Image (tube, grey):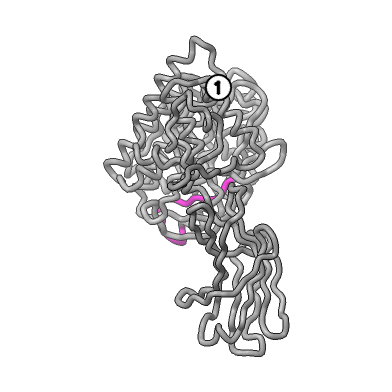
Amino acid sequence: MAPLVSVVVPFYNVEQYIAECLESLATQTLNDIEVILVDDGSVDGSRRIAEGFASRDPRFTVVRQPNRGPGPARNEGVRWARGAYLAFADSDDVVPAEAYELLVSSLERTGSDLACGGVRRMADGELSPSSLHDKLFRREVRRTHIMDRRALVRDRTVWNKLYRKEFWYEHRLRFRQGIYEDVPLSMRAHVLAASVDLLPDVVYHWRRREAGGTSITQRRAELPNLADRLEAIRAVRSFLQEEAPELTRSFDGLVLEKDIVFLFQALEHADEDELEPLLDLARQWLAVLNPGVLATAPSLRRLELHLVERGLVKELRRVREFRRSSEEAARIVPRGLRRVGWYGDYPYFRDRSLRIPDEVYDARDEIKVLARVEECRWDGQGFAVVGEVALHRVERRPRKIEVWLSDGSRKVPLPSRRLGPGRLMAEIDPRRLRRGGPTWRLHAQVEARGLVMEGCFRDGDGNRTWRLSVPGWSRTGMDITQ
């Protein structure tokens, strides 16, 4: 009988890691799987370990091919797959025991074309959030789609997913050759799927490899690999412009956040004779991306891009070092008299010799209000709320602060007084909240050198919006939501 799930695992010279990966597949709580191990021309002990698993467990099969890269190896594995569902795992990673049981259960319940789950990074035996996936899988969402949840452009890996094989073949999905093969396929699958399930469960442990020099991840700043990555980006953008043009800006934003960093790293460490080809490639990258996305990138990223475009590599290296060495976000400072601007206080900001336009440093849109409630106490007549208000990355204290409560339709201004730099106490009279609510949020408006901004107060640990609930009229008129 055909298995329910086919798991394709390409491998190449991963003797140090492959046993842990295969053991995680052998101990899945869903027993009805087959594991297709595609030897992509390994010359170390990886094949011996893979064949050892296959000799002990009939669910494991080893397929051999000359070294052609992970994309063609995965395509070869799919050709051998007999299951109703397809999954992929990289041979240096680990799949949690219940992963495929959870993913299959979701697809059989909803009928969606693919299911995706959470990811953790794995290093030195410790697990940490994956910055690429962390915000995508915080809650369960069934039968959704990337056009409804555009943040899914970040979900560009193939191994945290389970696909219906009939969907795979219907849309003729195939991996491209190269080291950036995940992204074009993942974007095609998300766009072409009728619906997708998102699970909050962690279904994959993605290893961060530090030792050795054979990892594809470690070679991603090499010139040929950067050129291949650019071709993959072009392929994704071409597909999106034809099938889902609304997603191109989101995709370009992710390229500027994640992929461009590998270009910077290459330029930081390049020898003199490597600089010109790298700069030429970098300018090709920038020419591909939407100018509007480039213009709205964070100010420090805009400075890096400006320096690259002008070929100022020495200056780029200093800015990259500044980024790494800043323990906290760099300051945003005002400049101007009648017309005040707010700018990132980065290298060369005060150096007019380079003639970097002020708009490169413009960081006004990156400023936000930080408002925190320290305590709320009853004084016999009303509540006294003590809190702190500041502007993120701005040392200058707000000149003026106003606070009020809002239930979404009513705004109740509150009297307040300063207790010191950035600290204040607001007074709440419960009688003013009658016939309102039931939930009230505390807001602040701050002014500083022509800048006027609003924000909500958060609780003491800064994780949740601070609220007052009014379940019914009583002596105090409210309870504090904890």
| Residue 276: quadrant of the picture | top left
Q: Residue 159 lies in magenta, yes or no?
A: no
Residue nearest the observer in this picture, 453 or 316: 453
The count of marks equals: 1
| Residue 52 makes an appearance in the image | no
Q: Classify the position of the C terminus by image quarter.
A: bottom right
Looking at the image, residue 204 sits to the left or right of residue 411; the answer is right
Q: Is residue 283 left or right of residue 15?
A: left
Q: Which residue lies furthest to the bottom in this view?
A: 474
Query: How far from the left and from the top, in percent, is residue 278?
Result: 45, 19
Q: In this view, does 478 lie above or below 85?
A: below
Q: In this view, does 12 lie to the left or right of 188?
A: right
Instruction: Give SS at disc 1.
Output: helix
The answer to whether one can see residue 179 in this image is: yes
Residue 64, x across and y down, in percent:
51, 24
Residue range in magenta is 108-119
Is residue 112 inside the magenta stretch?
Answer: yes
Name the residue rendered at 43%, 45% in the picture: 153
Out of 263 and 403, give the one closest to the viewer.
403
Extreme residue toward the left, this view: 242
Residue 462 location, quadrant: bottom right
Location of residue 281 in the rendering, given as x and y in whole percent from the top left corner: 41, 22
Q: Which of 204 and 442 is in front in this view?
A: 442
- Where is residue 57, by image quadrant? top right
Q: Mark 1 points at which residue?
A: 268
Residue at horizontal 42 percent and vertical 32 percent from the top: 357
**Callout 1 amino acid:** Glu
Residue 127 higher or lower than 10, as above or below: below
What residue is drawn where x is 36% and y is 35%? 289
Find residue 286 and report its horizontal and vertical position in percent: 38, 30
167 horizontally vs 405: left or right: left
- The residue shown at (67%, 57%) is 421
